[in-house]
Image (cartoon, rainbow, N blue to C red):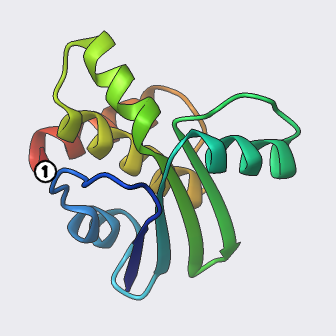
Amino acid sequence: MLEIRNTTRGSIPRVAFERIARELLGARYELSLVICGEKLATRMNIKHRGKRYSPNVLSFPLSKTEGEIFLNARVAAREAQRFGVSNIQRLTLLFAHGCLHLKGLRHGTKMERIEERMVKKFA
């Protein structure tokens, strides 16, 4: 199950969040996705990680079958422009990245390969 909350004032491109979550986390995983801006992302980063910058995505596992992702739409849009990709591609990659962290994966080649596959399949 996926619950999505958009705390920004803007609209978000149509990303296949539910399909990506189901593929990476399974149908029984309960996920809360918060689409946020820089202020909330920075507050969460300071509170939970002690870091004072606005991250593109934060993942918080609550249990083996529950988690929460904060996806910073503003940073994602700037990164999409900088990397020469669409906003949908960047949001897809970042959401997949967050889901993979919830599964326990760390940064590396395996994570990058899965992220690329998700972008090709869903963006």
Decide: is 54 above or below 8: above
Front-most of residues 95 and 87: 87
Residue 39 in the image: x percent, y percent?
Answer: 64, 43
**Can you give x and y, in whole percent of width and height, for residue 119 in the image?**
19, 40
On the picture, is 52 further left or further right than 121? right
Residue at position x 19%, y 41% from top? Answer: 88
Residue 62's x, y, as percent?
Answer: 70, 75
Q: Residue furthest front?
A: 9
The three-letter amino acid code for the residue at tag 1 is Phe
Which residue is rendered at x = 75% and y = 47% of the image? 43
Q: Is residue 82 left or right of residue 47?
A: left
Which of the image's four quarters has the C terminus? Answer: top left
Q: Residue at x 82, y 32 (%)?
A: 51
User: Closest to the observer: 60 or 107?
Assistant: 60
For the N terminus, the image quarter is bottom left
Q: Residues within 10 Å of mark 1 (few under 14, many from 20)?
A: some
- Asked if one can make out residue 69 in the rendered structure from this viewpoint, the answer is yes
Residue pictured at 28% horizontal, 23% vertical: 80
Looking at this view, is 62 or 5 the one in front?
5
Q: Can you identify the residue that label 1 sits on? A: 122
Q: Secondary structure at mark 1?
A: helix
In this rendering, does residue 103 appear at all? Answer: no
Rendered view: 80 above or below 6 = above
Question: Which residue is at the front of the view, 57 or 73?
Answer: 73
